[in-house]
Amino acid sequence: MVIGLGVDVGHAFLVRRQLTSIADDAVLSGSQAIDIPELHAGHLELEPSQARDDAMRTITANPLTTGQATATTVKRAGGRAGVDRAKRGAGEKSN
């Protein structure tokens, strides 16, 4: 039983590492979608729809991913883009 628990915990860490790597790849891919007209105007901004599409394409191209994924963009005050994390309940731990 202890060996089984060790194998399960080890597998969970391995899967989490793989999913983190896939998410990092998607973020890097999406971050390359620079809005060229804005760049020529002197503003470094991303083209949100292209960034989202590139990130989703990277996620779906990975053979380890199945199921559904969503990508959202949030426009912040001052022109900064960001991502809002879902709020956790009082008893839930953060990763």
Image (cartoon, helix red, strand yellow):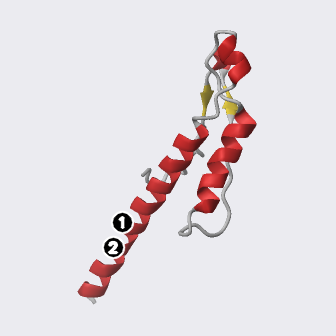
Callouts 1 and 2 close, C-beta under 8 Å: yes
Callout 1 secondary element: helix
Measured as percent of width and height from the top left, residue 38 is found at 70, 17
* Residue 8 in which image quadrant: bottom left
Please identify the residue farthest to the bottom as the structure is shown. 1
Does the rendering let one see residue 92?
no
* Residue 63 in which image quadrant: bottom right
Identify residue for label 1: 13
Indicate which disc residue 27 carries: none
Measured as percent of width and height from the top left, residue 87 is found at 58, 45
Left or right: where 41 falls relative to 4: right
For the residue pair 13 and 36, the one nearer the viewer reads as 36
Query: For the residues marked 1 and 2, what is the alpha-carbon distance in whole angstroms?
Result: 6 Å
Please identify the residue farthest to the left as the structure is shown. 2
Identify residue for label 2: 9
Q: Amino acid at mark 1?
A: Phe
Q: Residues within 10 Å of mark 2 (few under 14, many from 20)?
A: few
68 lies above or below 5: above
Quadrant assignment for the N terminus = bottom left
Please identify the residue farthest to the top as the structure is shown. 42
Measured as percent of width and height from the top left, residue 54 is found at 66, 45
Left or right: where 28 falls relative to 30: left
What's the residue at 71%, 34% (across, down)? 48
What's the residue at 66%, 24% (across, down)? 76
What's the residue at 66%, 53% (across, down)? 57
